[in-house]
Image (spheres, grey):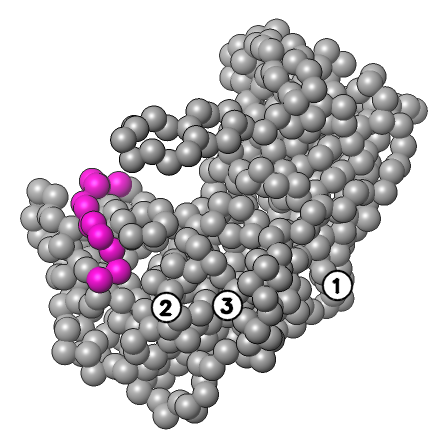
Amino acid sequence: MNTLALSLLLSSVPLFCADEALPKAETVLDRSIEVTGGKAAFEKRHNEVMHGSMEFTGRGIKGTMTVYQAEPDKNLAVIEIEGIGKIESGSNGEIAWENSALQGPRIKQGDEKAGSLRDGTFNAALNWRKLYTKAETAGVETVEGHECYKIVLTPKDGKPANEFFDKKSGLLIKTTVTRNTPMGEITAEVVADDYRKEGDIMVPHKMINRAAGQEFLIAVEKMEVNVDLPKDRFDLPPEIQGLLKKAPQAAATNLKPAQAPVASSSGNAGSSGNGGKLSIYMAGKPMASETYTVDKSNGKIEVSGSGNATMGTMKIDIEQFKVVTDDKYQPIEARAKAKLGQIPMNVKTTFAEGKASSEIDNGQGPKTREDNVSAGAIVVNANLPLYPWSFLAMRADLTNPDPQQFPVYVLGQAEVSATVVFKGREPVEFANKTADLNHITMDTKTPQGQAISMDLWLDDSRKVIKIAVPSMGVEAYQDGFERKAPPEAPANDSKSGDKPPKQ
């Protein structure tokens, strides 16, 4: 888990302002201290220990969490997730790090490091002037059903953070941040709820974290303040110390995202729309490969394939993801068999009479669930693989620019509605050629409520040639159509205001 979201929530406090006009940001931030307990109450706190639980929504994966924080800027989060193991992250005030059974030890660098150190500041609300170079009240927005003031906080390094405070109660409702990570640039949001007093201050006891199409819930069970902590509580673990002892060149190599392995070949990858191979990039770096087939026979349509992904040092193996429909695109069955590291992620689903009946096994034994699903739903996975969107490519109207509505069922989760628009034919440049392709866009929300947009470019046989998911920095390219990298940024010139060209 990324402790960024939790740290932001624990160090942020709400406000109260009765004025209808927009208050100044400094008024909002300073006033928040008084409303949640007052400056004196916060200054009496020198450390705290939070005990809680976490659960990945719709995945059946649960865990426990303990977070230690101490002034001025030390923190340690210890998470134990069923079937995955221990995940730790923290900072001694100078080094920000992570260590997990899935990804191994890692030292954060650049903007990611600056953000983690900023998030780890104890009683950060008291020190916002030191943490941010600028604070602005950007307006009023409705967030999670609350009318909120939007406060934009700009740090010296990294992108601004947005905090939304309820106008009536003064409580912090949501925080959004964008950070550079080994998986590329990721935007995360945290929704705070269930505020209760812990000692002399108010803190949220329920936090919904959303990022990259995933959602997990944190429930605070107990908070301890001014605890007698061991002196070595925030010392760097041996694995992190080992990384620091390596030569700078070796350490830098360790931090680079690994190259994506090539998926095992399966089936025909011909040019007639009956299959293919996708190379997937995140933030411009190779991260996954998928190979798949499309078979239309015996009154059925089957899309089936496999793939591999590497995100930092975390590996995902998709042994099979298969969807079978009848010749009218009504789903009959689906199967997902994959591993996240050593953790199995298996789903078997059958469709009948408007229901999706699933058996899900994430390593803790099979569980069943039933969801309402439309007869013509497009069945996809929450993230990878991308090739099941071939069903959308087959079905979209490529003659009509009017919006088209499709039900989309996220396997093992829920159905959402998608709006698809045919944008027309257009030339698309690749590294090795230019092709005239059909461009469609798809806008929807995840079952957890996160908006997501996707662009697909199809050839005349309706094979997917290129996919782009801008919010996640993800691109996918069909075999034979190589990604054209954007031009390199020009050398910095303090006398020039020119910006690097866009791709």
Front residue of 124 and 147? 124
Q: Amino acid at mark 3?
A: Trp
Dot 2 alpha-carbon crowd within 10 angstroms: few under 14, some 14 to 19, many 20 or more? many
Front residue of 117 and 55? 117
SS for dot 3: strand
Residue located beneath label 1 in the image: 342
**Relative to 95, does residue 23 appear above or below in the rendering?**
above
State the mark number for residue 190: none
Residue located beneath label 2 in the image: 120
**Relative to 445, does residue 498 appear above or below in the rendering?**
above
Check whether the beta carbons of the residues at disc 2 and disc 3 lie within 8 A of each other: no
Q: Position of residue 41 (x, y in %)?
A: 18, 78
Residue at 47% over, 58% down? 109
Give whichever of discs 2 and 1 has the lower sequence position: 2
Q: Position of residue 75 (x, y in %)?
A: 41, 74
Whether the magenta-drawn stretch holds residue 125 is answered as: no
SS for dot 2: loop
Residue at 66% over, 22% down? 431
Give whichever of discs 1 and 3 has the lower sequence position: 3
Residue located beneath label 3 in the image: 97
Residue at 55% over, 33% down? 469
Q: Position of residue 396 (x, y in %)?
A: 64, 18
Dot 1 alpha-carbon crowd within 10 angstroms: few under 14, some 14 to 19, many 20 or more? some
> For the magenta stretch, what is the residue range?
130-141
